[in-house]
Image: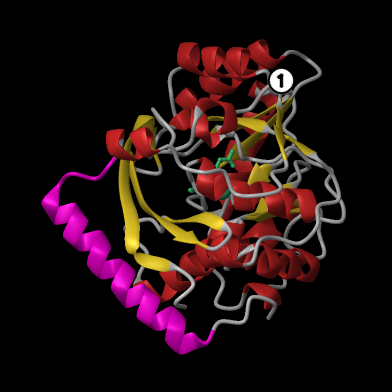
């Protein structure tokens, strides 16, 4: 992998606008290769083995590029964190998106807050907008059935509920009891072999994220294996990593749903110049033909400065690089 300039890795730390997935500062690494830059940003709680796929996505982007797209723009959902109703209204209203994805079940006893947030989101998006929720797998089957029924009512109809329960079996049980369609996210992405998850009977929609799945080519194979309509959703990358996710959304043979790639708005900044930044405009993002280039000034502004974090990321990158090289990674497999 001499093609990738690991010595020139740039470490960044960008504060989030609101806490999301327990994260208040997004950290990661940019790597340069012959085709431009890629982004390595596995969440801190992922071990090195899991992080290998994240590195593969960055290496694919900066050394190989992506398969040809089937479309040139992607409809985007705005993402509403577990915020109060006023803030939820504001996020949806100013997003320009016709679909909103709302985080629910953020903490125990969250249902009354979730219901108020959904009512507000429906007010903001209007009767013809679409509203989906994501519970990140925290409910058991009975809790899920009860919550989904109430959330569906508060939202004036849900497009789908993403990962209501942790297991495939529980998703199937909930799906048999509610009319709201079910989407599988963690069930696919965290599976030991995402190509072999029997998700078809348990969900109506597959959420696919190319960053943790090892690149655009692999994610396309996972999408095909899932055999369901797909939604591409982000891993909270900067514009550098979002480019791969948009390339995946662009290359899917069919795309029925808006994708969860409008997450740059959750960060307080980006690493590329304003005119290349992948911020949603009128509910859409373009499918890039090449990775955007980081702005040297922004790399300085958001450079990681905490010595302990720098050591942690540098050592992690070295370990994951060694695993990636041992794996003799095949991007097409
Ligand atoms: O899909 C979206 O609208 C935004 C992305 C998003 O929700 C997520 C990004 C990163 C980590 C995940 O916990 C979370 C998700 O569960 O889908
Ligand atoms: Mg999800």
The residue closer to the viewer here, 215 or 87, is 215
84, above or below 172, in the image: above
Disc 1 packing (10 Å; few <14; some 14–19; many ≥20)? few
The residue drawn where x is 87% and y is 51% is 254
Question: Is 306 colored magenta in this rendering?
Answer: yes
209, above or below 315, in the image: above
Tell whether circle 1 marks a residue whose Cβ is less than 8 angstroms from ligand 1: no
* Residue extending farthest front: 34
Residue 229: image location, x then y, percent: 81, 53
Question: Is 196 colored magenta in this rendering?
Answer: no
Let me know if residue 207 appears in the view: yes
In-image side of 222 versus 275 (left or right): right
The residue drawn where x is 34% and y is 58% is 9
The residue closer to the viewer here, 139 or 2, is 2
Residue 31: image location, x then y, percent: 42, 59
* Residues rendered magenta in the picture: 303-328
- Count of labels in the image: 1
Residue 58: image location, x then y, percent: 51, 61
The residue drawn where x is 35% and y is 70% is 47
Quarter assignment of residue 13: top left
């Amino acid at each position: 992998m001499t093609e990738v300039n690991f010595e020139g890795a740039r470490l960044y730390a960008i504060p989030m606008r609101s806490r999301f997935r327990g994260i208040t500062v997004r950290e990661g690494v940019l790597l340069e290769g012959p085709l431009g830059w890629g982004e390595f940003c596995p969440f801190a709680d992922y071990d090195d083995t899991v992080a290998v796929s994240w590195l593969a996505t960055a290496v694919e982007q900066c050394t190989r590029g992506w398969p040809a797209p089937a479309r040139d723009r992607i409809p985007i959902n705005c993402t509403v964190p577990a915020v109060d109703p006023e803030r939820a209204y504001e996020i949806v209203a100013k997003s320009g998106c016709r679909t909103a994805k709302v985080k629910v079940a953020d903490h125990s006893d969250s249902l009354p807050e979730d219901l108020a947030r959904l009512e507000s989101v429906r007010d903001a998006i209007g009767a013809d907008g679409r509203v989906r929720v994501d519970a990140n797998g925290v409910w058991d089957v009975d809790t899920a059935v009860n919550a989904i029924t109430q959330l569906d009512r508060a939202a004036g109809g849900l497009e789908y509920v993403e990962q209501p329960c942790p297991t495939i079996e529980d998703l199937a049980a909930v799906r048999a009891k509610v009319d709201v369609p079910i989407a599988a996210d963690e069930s696919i992405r965290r599976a030991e072999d995402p190509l072999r998850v029997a998700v078809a009977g348990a969900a109506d929609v597959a959420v696919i994220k190319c960053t943790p799945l090892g690149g655009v080519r692999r994610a396309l194979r996972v999408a095909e294996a899932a055999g369901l309509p797909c939604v591409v959703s982000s891993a909270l990358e900067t514009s550098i990593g979002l480019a791969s996710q948009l390339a995946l959304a662009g290359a899917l043979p069919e795309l029925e749903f808006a994708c969860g790639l409008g997450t740059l708005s959750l960060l307080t900044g980006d690493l590329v110049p304003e005119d290349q930044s992948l911020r949603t405009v009128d509910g859409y993002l373009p499918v890039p033909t090449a990775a955007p280039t980081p702005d040297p000034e922004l790399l300085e502004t958001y450079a990681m400065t905490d010595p302990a974090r720098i050591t942690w990321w540098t050592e992690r990158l070295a370990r994951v690089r060694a695993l990636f090289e041992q794996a003799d990674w095949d991007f097409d497999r």
